[in-house]
Every structure is written in structure tokens, then in C-alpha cells.
Amino acid sequence: MKPGVLSKTPAARPVPSMPRLSPSGWIVLALLPVLAAAPLLLPTYQVTLANNIGIFALATLGLVLLTGVAGMTSFGQAAFIGVSAYATAYLASVSAADLPASLAWMAGSPLAGLAVGLVLTLAIATVLGAVTLRLSGHYLPLGTIAWGLSLFYLFGNLEFLGGHTGLSGIPALSLFGIAFDKAETLFYLIWAVLLLAVVATLNLLDSRVGRAIRALRGGQRMSESMGVNSFQAKMTAFLVAALYAGLAGWLYAYTQRFVSPAPFSLQAGIDFLFMALIGGVGQVWGAVIGAAGVTFAKQWLQDLLPHLLGRTGNFEAIVFGLLIVLLMQRLPGGIAGWIAKTFERRRHRPAVLESMDLPDAEPLPRRPMPEKGEVVLEARGVTRRFGGLVANHDISFAVRAGEILAVIGPNGAGKSTLFNQLSCVDHPTSGEILFRGERVDGRTARAMASAGLSRSFQHVKLLPTMSVLENVAIGAHLRGSKGVAAAALRLDRAEEARLLAEARRQLVRVGLGQYLHAEAGSLALGQQRILEIARALCADPCLLLLDEPAAGLRFLEKQALAELLVKLRSEGMAILLVEHDMDFVMGLVDRVYVMEFGERIAEGPPATIQTNPAVLEAYLGGVE
Amino acid sequence: MNFQIVMLLGQDGLTNGAIYALLALSILLVFTVTRILLIPQGEFVAFAALTMAAMQGGTPVRLGWLLLALAAAAMVMDIHATWRRDGRPAVRRGSVLGVGYAAALTVLTTLVPLGDAGVAVQALVTMALIVPLGLALYRVFYQPIAAAHPLVLLIVSIAVHVVLVGVGLLMFGPEGARTEPFSDGGLRLGMVMLNSQTLWVVAVSLGLILGLYLFFERSLYGKALRAAAVNRLGAELVGISPELAGKASFALAALIGSLSGILIAPITTIYYDSGFIISLKGFVGAIIGGLASYPVAALGALLIGQAESFSTFWASSYKEVIVFTLILPVLVWRSLSHHGAEDEE
């Protein structure tokens, strides 16, 4: 279960008058006194260990977001920490005379070290992301492996970074007059940064940008059709992960007061991934559990294994490696995932919830709709060839505002090919497609979404573990504008409330109002199709493309759907649907366009189509 | 830099490049058939080289124990699988044979001194150990999750690599080793002296590439593997077991890896963890080939060999930095020629 969903569960609001607190909020509240007391009660050795865990957890948190939520893998986290730690260490230990006069003020300044470290880390991440994130998922891990090694060898060979011996003599951190010169004081700084990062991550996931990031795993085609820029969402996750690594590097340099290449090797990058996986990738708190678990287990194994094996070496890696294989084979959710699952099961959360807990918000502005009767979408001589196969041949038709057009035809008639071209997922070999008078063939699905075309999918595409409400809110992506920083700092709440209110409005409208907080995957197939229509409506389109909307619906559901479509038509919406259910089509639509073998065989109002001999011959198997 | 040095560096680059090309091909083969990025490919290389060195140096050969352990694990997993399926445990003949084979080979390599048996026999024994190791790795680590998301497969690959490096340290110790060259002398071409080991590497690589070509073009098993690579489900429907395809590709990868290790052992000092860096250069070659094209991957790997060799001359300590930074322009080019978003199933 995703943290964003967690924060809206009913168990978290005990009394209506009290401010709502999510489970994560309770965890933070419970942790605060423990953390405040820890340095006072624990011996210095344990505090130092807790400091390391905090730093590791910060870097691992980035991986949880990247790997667990966004479905990407990076082995470069340790190298990013290294870049920032080296920048910090260099500026902290260099004498002002060794820097160019204009930069001399940076020498010895921790804030300059932080700034330079973060800028360098983010710059490298931007370059790496720019060249790998458009490609399939294997290039990022391979790219980060190669770059992690490159940077490691670079650290070891650059004279001014001290080569393999590293940089020592970093003075103690002093910020705004407070000296962080002991493990106990550093503890507060590290864990404060970590908790802030955890809260920021939770906020980010529970936002417009967060939904785009969560849609990356298995929903990219869908979210692109809703106007989400997947590349940008990937880059966001990657940069946030790098940012956390950069922060961790700065803290690391001032905690150890010595840096050398070894802790930033590829092996360390792998260790961070292991921490994220063992803790439970996809669970924000898994970062803390994983970092603590691996650190303690490593210490224990480093004491135990040399006794067992009779020699020293990096043998704990064998145990961790086998543990990871076992986890991947048996428990892919990690420890935190397992806890969340067990917890959920015990709570017996009902699938159907009240819908009244969202505050009413000011409705979102709507786009100017075309006049009734205006041509919204037009195909002119569209032909699509796949090698020698002509899937669509010279298709021409128009859909007007306030009209429902159905495209029908037997299997293999080329309806899906046509549908893909109209939504700009595919492009015609020849011919033109015009949307509101402008030529659009060759544009991206994303551009069509912002122009006002919204669609559903033949094979339902939704994010099964995300709530119904959030799935539908993805449709409203382009109607909001708040970014990462606003989301992390909760400055997006007014806009977020409007987006969610819009999503709820559409869900109520299509009749799914009582399922707002259920997991989308728990709905029946017919309901999932209706959900897709609500999501499409959330984008405030002027043209709706529906791919077999009535498939899998029961009789009453079909009636309700037909009523909804009629209502949309009366509001001036242009609707094009591909459908197999003739009863549904004939009673509903204004015109029917019949295809067979990629060509038009008839077009007209339902009554004439139903008696058209060519249609009967082709579609119904001929007249006996 | 004069002609002599250019030829020397070029020869060095060619030798290494040929090895990287072999590894790139084997990485691609496994990837296309199983969607697994075989990060542990390098361990086959290092284990083969160190096993050869152990035989020649008269130190105990411990690789058999690893094979035995994996074979035993495979047997337990087989028994468990039949128990879950049929409600009662049963022992498959294959897994018994596997354990028997591993035990026999372990006894052989432990008791019989192979120091004077000659390179050919040592190489055969090494391959007899490592090829089944590839099979066993697939059975134990990958087969239970063969249908999982590629991300999960990659993570398991990394984990298996980490485990094998740790086990490698246990089996071979931290010292590096180098083996005797296959033959002395060399071949004089004009004013250039070709090293005999270079000739061996080039000849065996070419032979292996030709063999692979014939296997994939002419034999039924080769064609079945290609079919599985093109469309896994389609291949399964016409009766090509994905299990068999996976095992076969792993066995081939282990064969190629062990040959590479045997070839490279007289040229470079190999440590228990050297395999990763070597195979990573194969990965760079595979990336140049877009994780799809065999000839481009092989050419890319040859290029990496040359780049490495010449950067050793100019900026020795930055050798690895230069080689691994080379993937950046490749990725830029791949990224620019790529369109649109895709869902990975």
C-alpha cells in the first residue's frame, strides 16, 4: 500500500473535531520524544551508530522513491553522496589562498560546501538522467554502475582530493553559532534533516506530481494520454533521490571529518539498494528500517563470520546477497511492506467508504467549449499501412460537438488502429487528422490531452493499488500547475483540494461516488471502465474517445452509462466510441460509421445502418 | 608514440577487445532470451582463471564444492516444488544426476593432482566445472522468478554477483594469480611481433563466434532459443520450454565466460573480484549494440578494448574513468534516436 493512500484512511481520523493525522504523522509524533531522549541516554558509541544510520536512511529514502515508487533502479546513490561529501570536505579544509580570489569566501564555509555539493550532485544527475531516462529501464542502472565506477576512480586519482588516502582535517561543523562538534549534537541535526526529508517525501507522494511519479510504474501510456510528462516525472524522482544523497554527503563529511574513496564505491551503492529492498521499497519508513537493519546486521555478521570461517573478508556480503534473493523470491515488499500488509489485514478496512470527508473546494476553471455542431475531429483520407497490410484505407469522417458517433465493424476491421491514430498514439501513413480545425497527426498523445481530447482504453489501464479518487485525479493533471517544491512544503493544498473535488464530482456523476477511497483494483471490471470515463472527464475535454465502454457492464450499468453519454452530448461534448454491443450503440448514437477490412462500407443514422444490406452482409454474417 | 608502440597497444587492445566481445555476445544472448542482465557473467571469467591457476599452482581446487552446494540446493527446490504440486515429495532423476556429477567432479578435483596434466586437460576440467555452474545458478536463483518484472531480475542478478564475489574470496583467497601461456613464441609479421596468446585469443574467439553462428542458424536448439528471444509466449505455445531456454542460455554464457577466463588468465593477473570490471566492459559493448544487435555489440566491445589500451598509454590512472565515460556519448545518441514513453511489462 502506498503512503499517499495511507494518509487518507479512516482509522486516522478518530474524532471529527481533531485535526486529521495520518499513520505517518503518528509515527513522527511517537518518534520525536524517543529521538530527543536518545543522545542523553545512549553511550557515545551507540549515538555514532545512530548518526550513520540516519545518514544511510536519508540516502536510502531517495532510493525508496526512485525504485519503490517510480520503478527505476540506480546504483549511483553512493557516488552522489561521494560528490557532495568531497565538495564539502574540499571547501571545508582548503585554505582561502588556494582558491581563486573570487571564490575565496567559500573556504571553510559549511553552507558554501552544501550549496556546491548539491549543485554538483544535481548537475551530474541531470546529465545522467537526460541520457538514460528516455530509454528502457535497463539503461539507468547500467549507466549508474558505469558512472559510479568512473567517479570512484576519479576520486582516487585526483591530486587535490587527496588521491586514495583522501581528505582529512575537516573542521567541526558550526552553523549560525551552534557547534556540531560532538556525536550527540550531530545526532539532532542528522535526524531532524531525515525526518524533514521523510515528511517532504510523504507530502510529495500525496500530490499532483506524486501521482505522476506513482503512475510511472505500469501506467506510463495511460498517464501520457492524460497529459502527464513521464520523462519529467522520472527526472523529478531521480533528482529528488540525488538531492537526498547530496544532503547525506554533506552530513557524512561533517560527521566523519574525513573522506576517502572507499565508502563511495559501487559496492556501497549496492548496499544502499539492499537497504531499500530489505526495509521495504515503496514504503517511506522502509528506508529507516532498512538502514538500521542492515547496519546492525552487518556489525553482528562482521563479528560472527570470521569466527565461523576462520578468516576475515567481506563475507557478510554473501549473507546479504542470499537474503536479497530470498526476499525477491518470497517477500518482494520487504519488512515494511510486510508490516503494512499485516496491519491492513487486521484492520478489516471496508472497501466502500463514505464520500463526505473531502472539503468542498472552488471548482476548477473550464475550457471554452466549441459551439454545438462545430466539427471537433475530422479524418481526411487516413491510411495506415503496416508493411504490406493496409489496416486503414482512405478513412474520412467528422465528429461534431453535441454528437455521438460510433465506429463499428467486425474484429480485424481496423477500429483499434484508427482509434490509436485519432488519439495520436500512432500516426497515419498518409492522410490528415484535424482537431478543431488544426492538423494534429504527428503530435504526441500528451499534446492531444492538453488540446482537449480525452480517452479510455480497450484494456483498462489504471493503477490498481492507488485509490479510485487518486486514479481519477490523474485525469485532472493538466488542470493543476503546482510543482515539486510546493508539494513537499504543502503549499499546494488549495489546488490539490480543487483537483480532488473535481475528481470526486466526476466520480459521483458516473455513479462511483461511494468507492472514492477503495483501491481501484478492487472494483469490478465494469466499474473500472466507468472509472476510466470519470478520469477522462476530469480532464475537461471537448472530445471523448471511448474504446468499448460498455464491455463487461451489466444491464443497469449500461443504461446508466447511456444516460450519462446522452447528458454529456446535450452539454455539447463530442463523443466517438468504438463498440461491439449493438443494442447499446443503436439506441444511443446519432451516426454510425461501419468498417470492414480497413475500409468504410457504410455511414449514417442507426436506422438506415440497421437495414443496410452491405452492413448486414459484413457485420451480421449475411442475410439468409 | 611511434609505430612500434601503436602496434603493441593495438595488439593489446585487440586481445582484450576480443574477450569483451565474447562477453558482450553472451550478455546479449542471456538478455534477449531471459530478460536477465547477467551481472555475474564476470564471475565465470574470474572463477575459470583462478581454477586454472589453482590447478597449475597445486593449491586446492574448491570450485567443486560450490557446484555441489548449488546442485544440492536445486535438488531440495525440486523436491519442494513436486511436494507443493503433487502433495508428496518426489526426487527427480535430473537433480540426482546433478548432485552425483557435482560430487564426482569435486572428488576428482580434490584428490587428483592436475598440475602436470597439461593446459588442454586443465581447461576441460575447468569448463566441466563452470558450465554446470551456469545451469545451477539459473535453476536456484532465477527460475523461481523467471516471470518477474525485469527490475526484480536485475536486483537478483546484482545479489547473485555479490554472493559469488564473497564465495570467490572464500574459495580462492585475496591473492591474484596468473597462469602459464598456452605456447611460447609468436608470429612475426613484417616488423611486428604478434604475441602467441593474442593469436590464441583471436583464434578461439573467432571459432566461438562461428560456432555460435552455426548453432543459432543451423541447429534446432539454436533456432528454439532465437524463437524464445523474439517472443517468449509464442515460443512457449509452440512447445519451447522457457525453462529450457533459460538454462541453455545460462550454460552457453558460462561456457563463453569460462573460455574467456582461460584465455585471459596468462595475460592479466586475475583476482577473485576482477570479473566484474571485465564483464562490465562487455556490458558497455552490449549497450553500444542497444541491448539488441550482436554485430554492433561485438564491434563496440572491440572499440572498448582499443580505447582502454590507448588510454593506458596516455593516462594510465584514468583508464577506467575514460572507458566507463565512453558510454555517455552512446547513451546520448540512443536517447536522441528514441521516441515516446513505453510501459515495461
Image (spheres, coloured by chain):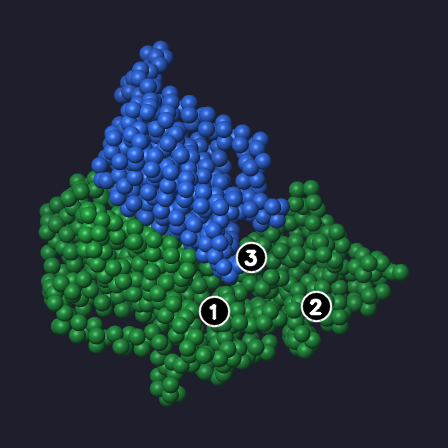
Query: Which residue occupies the foreground of this view, B120 or A59?
Result: B120
Res A445 label: 3
Mark toward the start of the polypeptide (3 vs 2)? 2
Mark toward the start of the polypeptide (2 vs 1)? 2
Alpha-carbon neighbours of circle 3 within 10 Å: few (<14), some, or many (≥20)?
many
**What residue is disc 1 on?**
A466
> Residue A54, how many percent across, how many down?
23, 63
In the picture, which quadrant includes the N terminus of chain A? bottom left
- Chain letter corresponding to the colour blue: B
What's under tag 1, amino acid-wise? Met
**What residue is disc 2 on?**
A404
Residue at left 13%, top 63%? A45
Relative height, residue B131 to residue B263 (above, below): below
- Chain letter corresponding to the colour green: A
> Residue B176, how many percent across, how many down?
24, 35
Mark toward the start of the polypeptide (3 vs 1)? 3
